[in-house]
Amino acid sequence: MKPGRDFRPFVPWILAGALFPILFYFKKFGPLDFWWAMTLAVAALVVSAHFSDANFARSIRDDARSGLLGKIVLGILSAALLYGVFAAGNEISVEILPFARRGIEAAYGLKAGVSSWRAGLLLFCLIGPGEEFFWRGFIQRSWQRKMGTAALPLTVALYAAVHVASGNPMLVLAAAVVGLYWGILYRRSGSVILVAVSHSLWDLAVFFLFPFA
């Protein structure tokens, strides 16, 4: 009797295609608000990546053991650069795109009625790093091994696509821009730690420290 097919490698892809659209559409999971729900979704994706890819956790550990301080510094600098890009983009978009201001306000509406300390800590400590471990450390890394340069645009497209259910064109556009930025950064540096630092700091700055709305 032939052994059954191992479906573990497909679990992260299925979860990403299901959890993020549901979360961005409903803005919550049952009694969990957006921030707890996003934390749970990202944790589920990281755990599924770990069990489907034997090298996933090892690649992150190896990354952290080599030149960690330099990666942190570059992560900080890259977050500052990306914030500057979005600051300029914010000014331009609200002038030329009729839906921009409404979309930006809707994105910041996710903070309404929640503790900024709780949401900020979840975003900085768990959501930001977890997203990078999954999207760049698992998805893009896996595709780079199989498809080379095609991995970058495919990862960006998938990352933007899971935000479509939000119904917010500005959120989808922002996801595409940051996905491309962090994807290039990961491809050039090979360090998911560096990109995770960049993502976490940028999230914290944009949503809580120096918001645009």
Image (cartoon, rainbow, N blue to C red):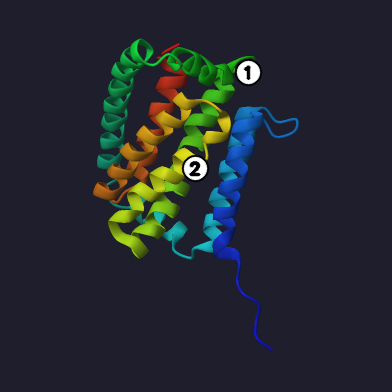
In front: 139, or 202?
139
- Where is residue 9 shown, x and y percent of the image? 54, 64
Look at the image and tell me in which quarter the N terminus lies. bottom right
Q: Which residue is rendered at x = 32% and y = 17% of the image?
A: 87
Specify which label sits upstream in the sequence, 1 or 2: 1
Characterize the local packing of mark 1: few (<14), some (14-19) or many (20 or more) Cα atoms within 10 angstroms: few
Query: Quick one: quadrant of the C terminus?
Result: top left
Q: Which mark is residue 33?
A: none
Dot 2 falls on a residue whose secondary structure is: helix
- Which residue in the structure is indicated by mark 2? 130
Q: For this rendering, which residue is in front, 17 or 127?
A: 17
Identity of the residue furthest to the bottom in this view: 1
Residue tagged 1: 114
User: Please, what secondary structure does the residue beneath circle 1 have?
Assistant: loop
Residue 155, how many percent across, how many down?
40, 48
Above or below residue 139? Residue 131 is above
Residue at left offset 56%, top offset 24%: 119
Q: Name the amino acid, label 2.
A: Gly
Q: Residue at x 28, y 23 (%)?
A: 85
| Spot occupied by residue 149 in the image (x, y as percentages of width and height) | 28, 55
Residue 24, above or below 86: below
Instruction: Give the residue type at disc 1.
Output: Val
C-alpha distance separating marks 1 and 2: 21 Å
Badge 2 crowding class, 10 Å Cα cut-off, few under 14, some 14 to 19, many 20 or more, is many
Q: Residue drawn at (59%, 58%), measured in percent from left and top? A: 11
